[in-house]
Image (tube, rainbow, N blue to C red):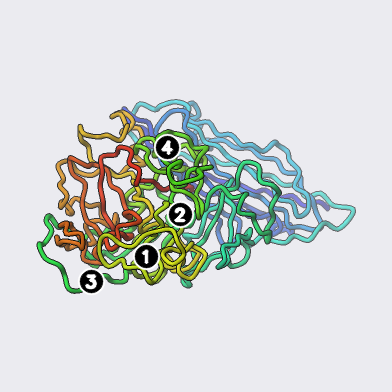
Amino acid sequence: MKKRNIMILVFMLVIGFASITSTLVINGTLNLGFNTTSFDADVIFTRAETPYGKASIGETKKEITFETEKLENVNQTSILEFDVTNKSKDYDASVTINCGLTEEFRSYSEYVRIDTNLESPFELVSSETKTGQVTVEMIKAFNEELTKDIQFECKLIATPKERDTLGEEYIPSTKYVDPVLNGADPILKENLVPVTISDNGEVTYANTSKEWYNYENKEWANAVILVDSPSKEYQEGNIIQENDIESYFVWIPRYRYQIFNEGNYTEAIRSKPETSIAKEIQIKFESNSIEPSTGSKVNEWLTHPAFTNFDVNGLWVGKFETGYKDASDTSSAQVNLIDSSKVIVKPNVYSWRSSTVSNMFKTAYNYERNLDSHMMKNTEWGAVAYLSHSKYGINTEIRINNNSNHLTGYAATDETDQSSHPGVSGTTSNVTLPYNTPTGYKSSTTGNITGIYDMSGGAFEYVAGYMNSTSDASGFIEEELVTYSKYLDLYPDGTTITSYNNRILGDATGEMGPFYSYADNDGTLRNHNSWYGDWGNFIDYGAIWFHRGNGFSTGILAGQFCIGRDTGQNSPGIGFRLTLSIK
């Protein structure tokens, strides 16, 4: 006898309607309801994702819970994508699907549209997986000030169909997770290819069902984006040719950190400290499914704002400073334009410099819109810097990239003097060595090849952090700063170069104090932090945009905790970095 199963997917919507702005927040569950036949355990959920929020499958694989962020405009949508798998070797299945508001809430159908991409009925043969998508769209504003829970359901009715032959054995797909990350594991989407990198720099397509990163061992997850037309199709286990790689990225998992300094400094002390106060930063990884920590005082815990800004489980950060594709020397990488096609993020390439902040920002923003690419924010720089100085990173100062040609991924040799300013720089192997050498590893955030490079020295790096001023030379117009505000860290007006108290907790500026003013070997009086003597100038009216890391010749002033500033105009020594904030 054929068996019949009914699977019911129930979605809970919380819809907040305001008189000015219509908002839609969806919190939901999908439940598979079965009778007691032997076919019950054979149809399960095997994947659930929503690009704009959170989704997870329950332990029984019969339930999906999810929530989305606010939909603030008519025609905005929220999409839930899920996989349904037939594990049975004995039966195929014919499945019908029907979605709609429940009877109690059908009067709201003029405001919400619910669609699915699955035709009804569809076949789900033995061991097959089908991907379903449910789209909720706000189609009309509701002009009353109220919030109301609205429920809809999708009913899947599966009728088993006997087979003449035994079907294929179902082999569940597995995904490696690092237990220390507590659910903040890397998110891979579309063009991102997971990779492992050997000590000599050889790149291999990673098998994601096996361990390919281990943050306890300071082995951070890496991924690459391939060029438009790679010379061959790659599979798991294949070595990927360097010429087929366009950009490298490294995963920074979401975390909270224990505040070690509130950063409320307003001046630099006129002396030089005898010792560094650098300390291991205490970090605990967490997923975005838990309530963020909101501490503001020493010893309290704060979920780093780089993650809460986009409500993501982590960030993919450019492994190297952004390079200029096809540049043949350092001068040909000085180009002031918007052109995402010229982006490369690779070792041993010339850093793209001499662009205005606006051109850098728009180039980064348009690079991979589907991966939410953007110019690194000041707080995002801080997130990487803090992780680097924890037990999961190098936990000391990153070695300077002192390559005077602005080549990415280099590190100063042990023999060079970087104890003051200026430091020793150059291009020969007795002065600087590449990323895939024991010396090169010291310029990585992990002290090995899996980390992020060029955060000390190389080019200065503009970051998307500024204060409002009429002296802005970045190329932005006022309306654009509003449009892109989510991708910019805005600081209070009226700051000075010692207004460290205007820091954003987590941005690795004020928290690196107290600050000291003393002369370097060149006789110039400068502000320095109290960790490693890195340069410490906050933004002010004359230079309203932050840059970080410092340059190849700056010696002691360079480092992951360096704070610098400029006008936002193009400069031959300043480049930028990419970040991806996918969900």
Q: Is residue 14 visible?
A: no
Residue 184 x/y as whole percent = 47, 59
Query: N-terminal of the two: label 3 or label 1?
Result: 3
Q: Of the residues shown, which amino acid type is indicated by label 1?
A: Ile
Query: N-terminal of the two: label 1 or label 4?
Result: 4
Mark-to-mark CA distance, 3 and 2? 28 Å
Mark-to-mark CA distance, 3 and 1? 15 Å
How crowded pointer 3 is (Cα within 10 Å; few <14, some 14-19, many 20+) is rated as: few
The relative height of residue 342 versus residue 3 in the rendered view (above or below) is above
Q: Of the residues shown, which amino acid type is indicated by label 2?
A: Thr
Q: Of the residues shown, which amino acid type is indicated by label 4?
A: Val
Q: Nearer the viewer, residue 114 or 575?
A: 575
Mark-to-mark CA distance, 2 and 4? 17 Å
The relative height of residue 11 versus residue 139 in the rendered view (above or below) is below
Any mark on residue 408, and which?
2
Query: N-terminal of the two: label 4 or label 3?
Result: 3
Helix, strand or loop under label 3? loop
Residue at the disc numbered 1: 398
